Amino acid sequence: MQRFHDRKEDLMRAFYYWKRAATQGYSAAQVKLSDYYYYDWGTNVDFEVAATLHRKDSEQQHNAQAMFNLGYMDEKGLAKTNADAKIPVAIALIKLQISLVTPISNEKNKCINNFKITFAMNLELLESFGQNYPEEFDGTLDCISFAVTCAFNKHGTLLAVGCNDGRIVVWDFLTRGIAKIISAHVHPVCSLSWTRNGHKLLSASTDNNVCIWDVLSGDCEHKYRFPSPILKVQFDPRNDKRFLVCPMRYAAVLVHIGDTHKCLPLDSDGDLNIVASFDRRGKNIYTGNAKGKILVLDVDTLDIVASFRIIVGTSSATAVKSIEFARRGDGFLVNTSDRVIRVYDSKEVLALGKDGEPEPIQKLQDLVNKTTWKKCCFSGDGEYICAGSARQHALYIWEKSIGNLVKILHGTKGELLLDVVWHPVRPIIASISSGLVSIWAQNQVENWSAFAPDFKELDENVEYEERESEFDITDEDKSLDLNADAKQDEEIEVDVLKIEPVAAFCSSDEEGEDENALQFLPMAPEVEDPEDGWAVQDGLEGSGTKDNESVGASQDYADTVPNKKRKLNSYDINLPDAPTDEIHPLVSSKTNKDKQAASGKKTAGRPKK
């Protein structure tokens, strides 16, 4: 808590804005403002004012957070609340002790690390023996704009959604709220990729521009202009200083941040319809072409270390549409134009070397409808594979180990699927159709035996049978335990300072989690008609001499702090003989639909004679 008081000027400024928002009827601002009175942030401690704000918000707005805070103050003897709020608050406080008992050691992210611990603990307590794939629809995320593509960060706490108006909407996936909106491009966003630590976001647009964004500030750090449309961009999984770009009808390009770039070598047949992807750890790049040839390139030297061709039947080849790698394990899938998804083992592919003939682990397809696949992905643990149909909003889920179809998730009829991604650590899928992000998850069933192992769930009312000597003060029939005293004397040392890394967030070659990873974004209230300067004196009227001195210091601080904005670095990427007249598939499909709609319209008025 001392760290917050060291930033007194910032707290006073935040207190002023929260107070402005609270007077305008912003419900969440009233709850936040009471925290400032409670914790002595930017103002003097006043428990009575804090309780009044909570009571007003709970009675008028029925705000659950205000009800809980008021009940918490009642538990501490600082305020009074009704009896109905005491019992649930008391139960919740017992559960909160688990997440509040552990001190946080990381100074940089201390203000949000309490959410990290709670999220990680809940992740470890999830049921791991049941089915680990979504089963039903769990709501939508409306970005206001028309959503086109999306991508999760490494921990699955943030979801970036690219829209057709060029904006990137970053969702806080734990609260299902918009955390940030970045006005990125002027044309539709067609591809997104996160860095490993989540601080940078890579975006590509149909205007042939590729940009790198600072997620916290929303500033564009680097901008690359390509001569041809961009189909896909991807950050190196282990190196945020380079990324992969797949131009349309051209060799894939490996870009090092700066102005250096290298074109990946092509196969001897010279086919230019290239798709490419980093492997799980960024050591190799896998490329595929329209003739079914897969090349494995060393990421540092760009030498071909392995290759094979996908053959259908005896001689005919099939085009490679996409290559996707699992977050765990050595498996990767290849989506081809023959409507079959092939799963390979990367270790086997590398062991066979050039011109090998690896056998796929699984071949997945829709034998009934012969569905073509728009997008495919692995589950977070690599045990399931999800494929989205190109004809309708339908998601097919297979179990990778045995190849059986376990679930088909059907969206609204008549909609076409644009993108689908699987949550990195949870059995949750996000799909995009008709401009909305649909969320698919499991049906949550309460399991009270997890809190008390001897808890018995009843389907109907039964008459309770009292056990012998259950309510006796002393149990006369109890057998004597000779080792009872010895068990009581045993002392077990409990380490409450060390935070164990969550296995779901770590790879097998890592010792711990990245402490600098960006998992959550700070949020600020939206103030209507904000003024150019923040008149702190209006927000702190009637304060003492010390407050007035702090106000003066805060005003000086506001005047002296510059508006920090990083300089944009722009680069023009020169690709020899690149096709400049190609139209991006997103734009061309939209143009065709508009033409069809225009031709189908009937002209109003009298018919011509």
Image: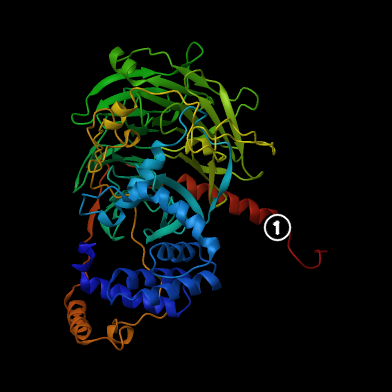
Depicted 75 relative to depicted 484: above or below? below
Q: Label 1 amino acid?
A: Lys
The C terminus, quarter of image: bottom right
Residue 457 visible in the current orientation: yes
Please give the name of the residue rendered at 28% of the width and 47% of the height, measured from the top-left corner: 102
Instruction: Name which quarter of the figure residue 122 lies in.
Output: top left
Residue 557 in the image: state x and y as whole percent. Answer: 18, 77
Please give the name of the residue rendered at 34% of the width and 42% of the height, measured from the top-left corner: 154
Depicted 403 relative to depicted 213: above or below? above
Please give the name of the residue rendered at 42% of the width and 37% of the height, measured from the top-left corner: 125
Decide which of 144, 590 is in the foreground and name it: 144
Seen as rendered, the residue at the extreme top is: 314
Residue 169 in the image: state x and y as whole percent. Answer: 42, 56
Q: Residues within 10 Å of mark 1 (few under 14, many from 20)?
A: few
**Residue at label 1?**
601
- Secondary structure of the residue carrying numbered label 1: loop
Depicted 76 relative to depicted 478: above or below? below
